[in-house]
Amino acid sequence: MQANDPVSAAISVSQLNRRVKTLLDQGMTRLWVEGEISNLSRPASGHIYFSLKDDSAQVSAAWFRQRQRGPAGGFKDGDKVLAFGRVSIYEARGNYQLIVEQMEPAGEGVLKLRFDALKKKLATEGLFDEDRKQQLPALPARIGVITSPSGAAIRDILSILGRRFPSIPVVIYPAAVQGDAAPGELVSALASAVRRAECDVLIISRGGGSLEDLWAFNDEELARAIAACPVPVISAVGHEVDFTIADFVADVRAPTPSAAAEIVVPDQAEWLRRIGVLAIRIARVGQRSVEDRAQELDWLARRLIASSPAATLRRQSDKLRENRRRLAGGIRVALSDAGHRIALLGRALNSVSPLATLDRGYAIVMRADTGNVLLRAAAVATGDDIRARLSQGELIATVKKVIDDE
């Protein structure tokens, strides 16, 4: 039989696959592969078998039980992952496959590393230190909100503010809160709020989402802009379990947009009640001062009457006149101070009164049948009766058309 005889030169399929396996094992180092999981199966052995695919190709993969670490059970078909391992061949079938040693979500795994690195960097620079945090105003004159004007976050914030302290005006600085353009727009909106200097507290906010959805709030430029902002900033991004770099660098972190609205203003009814109590206390102090001076005058008068010598009488008379003069002056000062304080409180009370808002040309619109205040046009329908409370009097009207700008 000649050397080039196909029969003598042939090798078995097993030998072929073994040679290929050796070449793959020796010729390729371990590497990361990114793709989407499909055809995932979990036999009783505990091993995990699946395919990794992209738009134009796929490869078989095996993740053996002894190599699995962390939440391996959480992966499913459709997940985009980063798989680390080596290329080999399953000799019995001749299938080339990836033997996985480690796997993590493709998007969030990389983003989490970037998040941790930036967090460590800014913390080292002191941007998260508590001693650089600013105090929020007890009662802001105007509130600024940096967010998407069409998102759920602004609706939640305005709803809570309208219930707790409706007389405080709100300025919205619109910005995208997701996507490649979002970080730049957020920085620009913050700069605009600082430049216009019309608010004494700012809320930067958006609703919940994945790490990728919230990534704009992990931008380094935005973090530094918040840290340098001369106006106190509340960060209200995502849900209570979500944390962003903006949360750490802001003066106050609110777990949700609604919570930010609760934090930024007091309850108006409780605030007015406290002012009323304070006014009563001031009036009582003034009255008590007058009564004390009057009692002192009576005591001096009795001592004067009890003195018999003429010289003593003259001295006591002179002293009485002087005390009367001082008493009259003291009473006038005490009453003036009390009146001034009460007037200041009255002006403060009037400035936040809904009636003062009516005097500026606004109206409170209510349903005619229930008396409920209307906040949204969609809460009534054509033909419904409504009442409009003006500064003087009320109007009864019928809705001819509803325009819902939501």
Image (tube, rainbow, N blue to C red):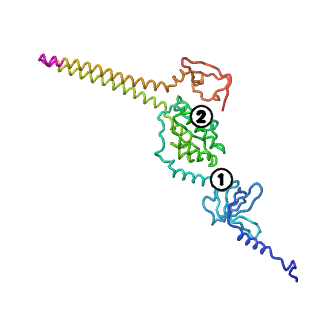
Q: Name the spot of residue 307 as percent of width and height, x first.
A: 14, 19
Where residue 2 appears, x then y in whole percent?
A: 88, 82
Which disc is residue 107 wearing?
1
Name the residue nearer the viewer: 339 or 261. Answer: 339
Q: Is residue 272 above or below residue 13?
A: above
Viewer-side residue, 60 vs 48: 60
Q: Is residue 141 left or right of residue 296?
A: right
SS category of the residue bearing label 1: helix
Can the viewer see residue 44 in this picture?
Answer: no
Q: Position of residue 404 (x, y in %)?
A: 66, 29
Q: Quadrant of residue 223?
A: top right
**Mark number displayed over residue 282:** none
The quarter of the displayed image where residue 51 is located: bottom right
Q: Which residues are magenta?
A: 305-316
* 372 in the magenta segment: no
Specify the quadrant of the image occupied by residue 239.
top right
Q: Which residue is mark 2?
A: 172
Tell me, yes or no, whether the two marked residues, 2 and 1, touch with CB atoms within 8 Å: no
Q: Of residues 25 and 61, which is closer to you in this image? A: 25
Q: Label 2 neighbourhood size at 10 Å, few (<14), some (14-19), many (20+)?
A: some
Q: Earlier in the sequence, mark 2 or mark 1?
A: 1
Q: Can residue 374 be seen at all in this image of the molecule?
A: yes
Give amino acid for label 1.
Answer: Gly
Question: Residue 127 in the image: x percent, y percent?
Answer: 51, 47
Q: Which quadrant of the rendered structure holds the C terminus?
A: top right
